[in-house]
């Protein structure tokens, strides 16, 4: 993609917004901790609950991931994996996200959230991947800039297993790769600074829960919020 995913040079300002040179901040040589703005909490979800969810996925209906294109939603090489139907466990997953987001949102400067999207349950088998993308923005070649196209401000992932090979979570603009472990929570801003991808699984299966939040008080690109949104209580 070229410029949209360019990494700053060592002397250029870091993408995290600290104002420090990239080489002294998130791209410092030998850095092993997550870049600023990427929250990682290993073991957030108990292993026993993760195992139950993975077992559920093995029995639940699934359908191929799809991608929005000019001709509508279709299967795409951008996303190779499956959506697990969550009808039978939706209430529990919604409550999980209602609990998880407020615990960490203030670390990103968001004191209050307006709504959450419905959670999704994703499964990746061998060859499964999701190419690098931003959750809320798209690159406009005509304007030579990223534009917000979806009302998402925070992204959350919860990994349910680790018995697979490949499948790392990568943030190429920071040169950061993370190997998921059972129960790990990862949260980060949804904008293009934190463009990320799921590297191909080479063996086994990888399961992850995903959800997105809209923070209160920020400008919106849609006239109306999603009809199936999960409204958050005023706080």
Image (spheres, grey):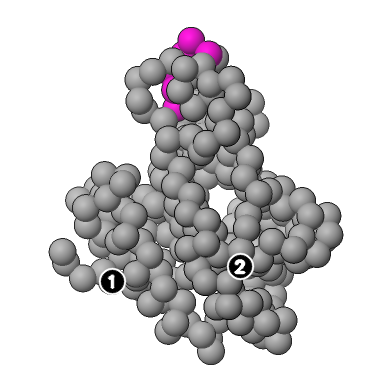
Q: Which residue is pictured at 26% across the width and 44% down the height?
A: 109
Residue 93 sits above or below residue 112 on the image: below
Q: In the image, is 171 to the left or to the right of 231? A: right
Q: Main secondary structure of the magenta part?
A: loop
For disc 1, the neighbor class at 10 Å (few under 14, some 14 to 19, many from 20) is some
Of labels 2 and 1, earlier in sequence is 2
Give the farthest residue toward the bottom.
Answer: 88
Quarter that holds the C terminus = bottom left
Q: Is residue 179 left or right of residue 145?
A: right
Residue 232 visible in image: yes
Distance from Cα at disc 2 to Cα at disc 1: 25 Å
Callout 1: SS = strand
Q: Which residue is mark 2?
A: 160
* Picture residue at 37% right of the left edge, 50% below the top: 153
Q: Residue 11: say if magenta.
A: yes
Residue 21: x %, y % from top left: 44, 15
Q: Which residues are magenta?
A: 10-15
Q: Relative to the observer, which residue lies in front, 101 or 223? A: 101
Q: Position of residue 119 (x, y in %)?
A: 48, 70
Q: Name above or below for residue 70 compared with residue 234.
A: above
- The part of the image, by quadrant, that contains residue 163 is bottom right
Q: Residue furthest left?
A: 235
Is residue 53 at least partly visible in the picture? no
Q: Which residue is mark 1?
A: 231
Front position among marks 2 and 1? 2
The answer to whether residue 40 is magenta is: no
Query: What SS does tag 2 mark?
Result: loop
Q: Which quarter of the rendered picture does the N terminus lie within? A: top right
Q: Nearer the viewer, residue 26 or 84?
A: 26
Q: Residue, x 58% and y 43% (percent of image)?
A: 196
Q: Position of residue 217 (x, y in %)?
A: 20, 51
């Amino acid at each position: 993609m070229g410029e949209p995913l360019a990494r700053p040079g060592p002397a250029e300002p870091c993408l995290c917004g600290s104002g420090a040179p990239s080489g002294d901040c998130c791209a410092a040589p030998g850095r092993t901790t997550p870049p600023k703005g990427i929250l990682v909490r290993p073991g957030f979800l108990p292993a026993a609950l993760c195992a139950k969810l993975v077992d559920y996925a093995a029995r639940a209906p699934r359908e191929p991931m799809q991608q929005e294109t000019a001709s509508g939603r279709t299967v795409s090489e951008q996303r190779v994996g499956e959506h697990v139907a969550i009808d039978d466990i939706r209430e529990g997953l919604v409550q999980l996200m209602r609990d998880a987001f407020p615990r960490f949102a203030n670390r990103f400067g968001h004191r209050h959230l307006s709504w959450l999207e419905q959670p999704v349950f994703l499964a990746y088998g061998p060859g499964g991947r999701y190419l690098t993308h931003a959750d809320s923005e798209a690159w406009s070649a005509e304007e030579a800039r990223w534009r917000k196209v979806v009302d998402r401000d925070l992204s959350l992932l919860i990994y349910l297993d680790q018995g697979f090979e490949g499948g790392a979570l990568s943030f190429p603009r920071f040169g950061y790769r993370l190997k998921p472990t059972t129960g790990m929570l990862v949260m980060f801003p949804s904008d293009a600074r934190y463009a990320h991808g799921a590297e191909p699984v080479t063996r086994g299966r990888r399961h992850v829960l995903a959800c997105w939040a809209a923070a209160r008080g920020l400008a919106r690109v849609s006239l109306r919020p999603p009809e199936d949104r999960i409204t958050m209580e005023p706080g």
